[in-house]
C-alpha cells in the first residue's frame, strides 16, 4: 500500500491523494499507476475549470513585433502594459491584424500594404464633411470615439504568438494566463481538491457515479481561497460604508 503523509496544509502531493483512494476502496499497489494517471487527469480538469491561479509574466517583444506565448499556457486571461501604479492596462484585441507569416523573422518586411487608408487621406476626401474647427470643415467619419488605448494585438494560439502592429512602441508586455500543472518529483495539489480527485478516480474506475465527482468539485470550488469572503473584505466594506462622507 502506498505511503500516506498525514501532514495537511494548503497543498498535498498527488501521490498522497492516490493513497487515500487506494485505502478507501481497498485497492492494492498494483492499481497505483492507473489511479495516479487518473488523478492527474482529474487535476488537469479541475485546474482548467475552477482551481488554477493566473500566472503573470513580462514577455519581451521580438524584432518582428511578435511575442512568444509560454509553452505551459493553457489559456490566457489578460494582455497589457504596466502603468505607474503597478496596474495592468489591457491592450485592444484587433482581429483585423493578419497572421500572415507571423512566425517569420521578416514578418514586417512581408506586410506590404495594398491600400492606403491613412487619416490624412480620409480627412481630405470631399465626399463627406461632418466636423467644423477653426473656420473649416473636416471629415471625421469612421475615425472612432475618444477611447484611449495604448496599443493593440492579436493572439494566434495555433502558432503560439501574439501579434503587434508595426507601430507598436513598447519593448515588452504583461501576460496573464492559466498554466498547466508543474511536476517537481510529484504534482502538488490544493488540499481542497482532495475529495474531488478521489471521486474522479472512482468514477473512471466505475466504482462510483459521475454525479459524486461533480458534487465534490462544487464543494471544492466553494472552499478555494478567492471564492469565499474573508474578515478583511468584510471589515473593508464596513469601513467604506461608515466613512465620513455626504449621504444621498
Image (cartoon, rainbow, N blue to C red):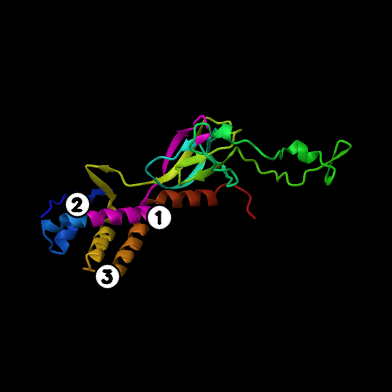
Residue annotated with mark 1: 227
The spot of residue 157 in percent (x, y) is 46, 46
Is residue 18 on the magenta stretch? no
Q: Is residue 14 above or below residue 222?
A: above
Between disc 2 and disc 3, the foreground one is 3
Part of the protein shown in magenta: 37-66
Determine crowd level at label 2: few under 14, some 14-19, many 20+ residues with C-alpha closer than 10 A: many
Q: Is residue 112 above or below residue 248?
A: above
Is residue 57 on the magenta stretch? yes
Which residue appears at 16% of the width and 63% of the height? 24
Query: Mark 3 falls on what kind of element?
Result: loop
Query: Mark 2 falls on what kind of element?
Result: helix
Quadrant of the frame with the C terminus: bottom right
The spot of residue 207 in percent (x, y) is 21, 68
The spot of residue 73 in percent (x, y) is 40, 44
Q: CA distance from mark 2 to mark 3?
A: 22 Å
Residue annotated with mark 3: 209
Between disc 1 and disc 3, the foreground one is 3
* Residue 201 or residue 67, whichever sits in front: 67
Q: Quadrant of residue 205?
A: bottom left
Task: Residue 9: tell me if it is visible.
Answer: no
Q: Of the two numbered discs 2 and 3 on the same chain, state the one appearing first in sequence.
A: 2
Residue annotated with mark 2: 16
Task: Residue 204: tell me if it is visible.
Answer: yes
| Residue furthest out toward the right | 135
* Residue 46 or residue 33, whichever sits in front: 33
Q: CA distance from mark 1 to mark 3?
A: 26 Å
Evaluate if marks 2 and 3 touch, with contact meaning CB atoms under 8 Å apart: no
- The mark found on residue 210 in the picture is none
Quadrant of the frame with the N terminus: bottom left
Q: Is residue 50 above or below residue 167?
A: below
Amino acid at each position: 500500500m502506498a505511503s500516506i503523509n498525514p501532514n495537511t496544509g494548503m497543498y498535498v502531493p498527488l501521490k498522497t491523494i492516490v493513497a487515500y483512494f487506494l485505502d478507501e476502496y481497498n485497492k492494492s499497489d498494483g492499481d497505483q499507476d492507473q489511479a495516479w494517471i487518473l488523478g492527474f487527469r482529474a487535476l488537469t480538469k479541475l485546474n482548467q475549470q475552477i482551481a488554477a491561479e493566473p500566472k503573470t509574466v513580462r514577455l519581451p517583444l521580438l524584432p518582428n513585433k511578435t511575442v512568444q506565448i509560454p509553452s505551459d499556457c493553457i489559456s490566457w486571461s489578460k494582455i497589457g502594459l504596466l502603468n505607474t501604479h503597478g496596474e495592468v492596462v489591457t491592450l485592444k484585441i484587433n482581429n483585423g491584424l493578419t497572421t500572415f507569416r507571423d512566425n517569420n523573422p521578416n514578418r514586417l518586411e512581408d506586410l506590404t500594404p495594398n491600400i492606403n487608408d491613412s487619416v490624412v487621406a480620409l480627412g481630405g476626401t470631399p465626399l463627406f464633411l461632418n466636423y467644423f474647427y477653426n473656420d473649416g470643415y473636416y471629415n471625421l467619419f469612421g475615425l472612432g470615439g475618444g477611447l484611449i488605448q495604448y496599443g493593440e494585438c492579436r493572439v494566434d494560439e495555433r502558432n503560439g504568438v501574439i501579434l503587434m502592429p508595426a507601430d507598436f512602441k513598447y519593448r515588452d508586455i504583461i501576460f496573464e494566463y492559466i498554466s498547466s500543472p508543474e511536476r517537481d518529483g510529484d504534482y502538488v495539489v490544493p488540499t481542497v481538491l482532495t475529495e474531488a480527485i478521489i471521486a474522479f478516480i472512482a468514477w473512471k474506475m466505475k466504482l462510483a457515479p459521475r454525479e459524486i465527482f461533480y458534487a465534490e468539485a462544487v464543494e471544492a470550488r466553494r472552499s478555494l481561497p478567492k471564492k469565499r469572503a474573508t474578515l478583511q473584505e468584510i471589515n473593508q466594506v464596513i469601513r467604506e460604508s461608515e466613512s465620513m462622507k455626504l449621504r444621498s
